[in-house]
Amino acid sequence: MPLEEFIASNPDPREMKRALAVQMRLKEMKHHEIQPILGVSSNYISRWERKYREQGIAGLRLGHKGSAGFLSKVERQAVVEWIAQERQRTVSEVVEHIAQNYGVIYRSVQSYYDLLKSAGMSWHKGRKKAPGMMHLWCTSITK
């Protein structure tokens, strides 16, 4: 795909800015001319020009496109059903169940709360054991 076509069809402003910087350099514009137009540094221009020369259009694309969930849809549904089997669960029980049965440990506690909510549970914080500290195991989840 030619650079001009990439610019015309690209909805992501970060990729477009990269491509415009490269396009301007290919038209022999100097860094000090490009910088105020795009609001970028000289290093930015050099980096994306180099990546374009090495990798073509692929070098201008965003590297991160999101990630798939750690649990498949079937596994997620099985966890939700397991949670729903009891009237009350603790977050630590859910963490342990998922780690032992699926080898998954989420970085964010919110992921566990989302699973609990899907199972029809509501949650509230337990009492603090020490000032300023909330222990994950004292969070109780109830239908």
Image (cartoon, rainbow, N blue to C red):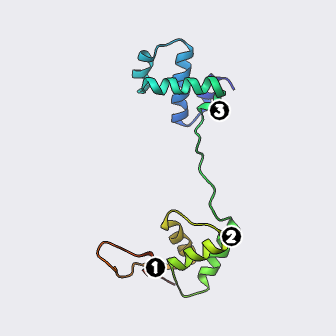
Q: Position of residue 118 (x, y in %)?
A: 57, 73
Identify the element where label 3 is drawn: helix
Left or right for 142, reference 97: left
Dots 1, 2 in contact, CB < 8 A: no
SS of the residue under disc 1: helix
Secondary structure beneath dot 2 equals helix
State if disc 3 and disc 2 touch (CB < 8 Å): no
Q: Nearer the viewer, mark 1 or mark 2?
A: 1
Q: Amino acid at mark 2?
A: Glu
Report the disc number at residue 75: 2
Q: Residue at x 42, y 26 (%)?
A: 41
Q: Going from the N terminus, do you reach mark 2 or mark 3 first? A: 3
Relative to 80, residue 24 above or below? above
Question: Disc number at residue 58?
Answer: 3
How far across and down, in percent of the image, does residue 96 sit?
Answer: 57, 76
Residue at mark 1: 137
Q: Earlier in the sequence, mark 1 or mark 2?
A: 2
Tag 1: amino acid: Trp
